[in-house]
């Protein structure tokens, strides 16, 4: 009995965390932006992250620049020496081959050649007084959300000379965009979701406007579903919802959801000061949380690859192992919990 009592005291915290989906902090690594002394122009705010899954390189945007980490072995990430000192806050990042596209707020869009990570080179800047929030690359086009100026479409076939070819003036404040086929889906903050035909990128045309009665921050589209990070949590819409103006399904989070990344059957939601929520979306009408972990700061952006999450967390870049086999762990944890708790209770009772 003494042995069981000691084992119970040591094992219960892990078993409970396993059963309720929490991930251990010992599986986490932090890269504080304030320790970045390579460039005096870079401050301590980590607000965007992108991942090159071919070279296993994480790009993370800070107040006035972008740094890089190689994660060939995610347990031993290597900070790379190259620094991209951007003209403004790196609000959003997109990798495309050897190029990195950085949405830099009032400083516009910057395009960097990062083939040689030890010596990244800025090859172009596009700036026409718009505040660029986000960037999405699809083929030879860059789609930029520019707040009150709506959606901008650039031809980047020649990345050294980006050219504006189309504009969609959204009624609200364009926050984020995703592209699926011949449509761009624009999250327009408090003015709903716009579905825009880009069959002709030089003449984008609104096809559907959907009002979800929520403030939208981020959008991801896959198959025939739209996933929205909003102030109510994660909203899941089918294309039928858009045509019928149905509200769809909402998985409510404790904080306004700032961004979402999909890796079916999971959606990874950056939930601000509540950290990261991992939601099973295999049943779109009944999403369920399968795991979560808190972060030291405010989770605003993330990417997931091969069992690791890379999170822009305000002051830090957070690397979190999320590869724990939840089903296997639960199968082991539950009978152990029974042995350690219920068996001693039954002995005492009878």
Image: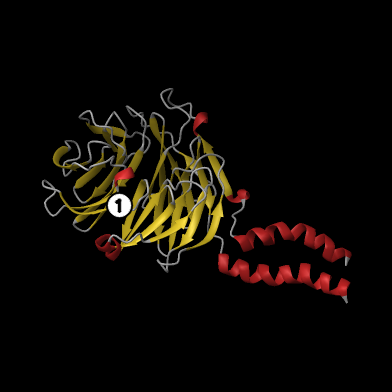
In the picture, measured across the screen, residue 238 lies left or right of residue 311, that is left
Most distant residue in the top direction: 40
Would you identify the image quadrant in which residue 226 lies? bottom left
- Residue 287 at what x, y percent from top left? 45, 64
Pick the residue in front: 331 or 176. Answer: 176
Residue that label 1 marks: 211
Pick the residue in front: 279 or 263. Answer: 279
Pick the residue in front: 231 or 70. Answer: 231
Q: Is residue 56 visible?
A: no
Would you identify the image quadrant in which residue 262 lies? bottom left
- Residue 203 at what x, y percent from top left? 11, 47
Q: Residues within 10 Å of mark 1 (few under 14, many from 20)?
A: some
In the picture, measured across the screen, residue 66 lies left or right of residue 328, that is left
Q: Residue at x 62, y 49 (%)?
A: 26
In the picture, measured across the screen, residue 107 lies left or right of residue 267, that is left
Q: Quadrant of the N terminus?
A: bottom right
- Residue 350 at what x, y percent from top left? 88, 77
Colouring chosen for the image of the structure: secondary structure
Q: Is residue 137 visible?
A: yes
Q: Residue at x 45, y 55 (%)?
A: 268
- Residue 337 at what x, y percent from top left? 72, 68
């Amino acid at each position: 009995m003494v042995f069981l009592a000691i084992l119970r005291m040591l094992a219960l915290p892990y078993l409970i965390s396993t059963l309720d989906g929490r991930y251990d902090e010992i599986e986490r690594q932090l890269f504080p932006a304030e320790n970045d002394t390579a460039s005096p122009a870079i401050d301590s705010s980590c607000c965007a992250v992108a991942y090159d899954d071919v070279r296993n390189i994480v790009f993370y945007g800070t107040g006035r620049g972008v740094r890089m980490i190689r994660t060939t072995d995610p347990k031993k990430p290597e900070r790379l020496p190259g620094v991209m000192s951007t003209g403004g806050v790196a609000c959003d990042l997109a990798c495309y081959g050897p190029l990195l596209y950085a949405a830099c707020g009032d400083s516009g869009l910057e395009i960097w050649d990062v083939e040689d990570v030890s010596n990244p080179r800025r090859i172009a800047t596009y700036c026409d007084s718009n505040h660029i929030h986000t960037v999405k690359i699809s083929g030879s086009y860059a789609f930029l959300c520019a707040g009150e100026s709506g959606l901008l479409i650039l031809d980047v076939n020649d990345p050294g000379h980006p050219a504006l070819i189309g504009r969609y003036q959204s009624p609200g404040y364009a926050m984020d965009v995703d592209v699926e086929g011949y449509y761009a889906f624009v999250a327009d903050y408090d003015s709903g979701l716009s579905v825009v035909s880009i069959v002709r990128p030089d003449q984008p045309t609104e096809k559907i406007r959907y009002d979800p009665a929520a403030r939208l921050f981020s959008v991801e589209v896959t198959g025939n579903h739209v996933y929205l990070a909003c102030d109510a949590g994660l909203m899941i819409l089918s294309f039928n919802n858009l045509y019928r103006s149905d509200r769809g399904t909402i998985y409510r989070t404790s904080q306004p959801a700032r961004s979402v990344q999909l890796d079916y059957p999971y959606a990874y939601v950056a939930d601000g000061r509540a950290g990261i929520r991992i939601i099973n979306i295999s049943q779109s009408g009944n999403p369920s949380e399968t795991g979560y972990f808190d972060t030291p700061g405010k989770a605003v952006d993330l990417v997931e690859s091969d069992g690791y999450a890379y999170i822009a967390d305000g002051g830090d870049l957070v690397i979190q192992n999320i590869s724990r086999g939840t089903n296997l762990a639960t199968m082991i944890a539950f009978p152990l919990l029974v042995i350690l708790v219920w068996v001693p209770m039954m002995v005492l009772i009878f």
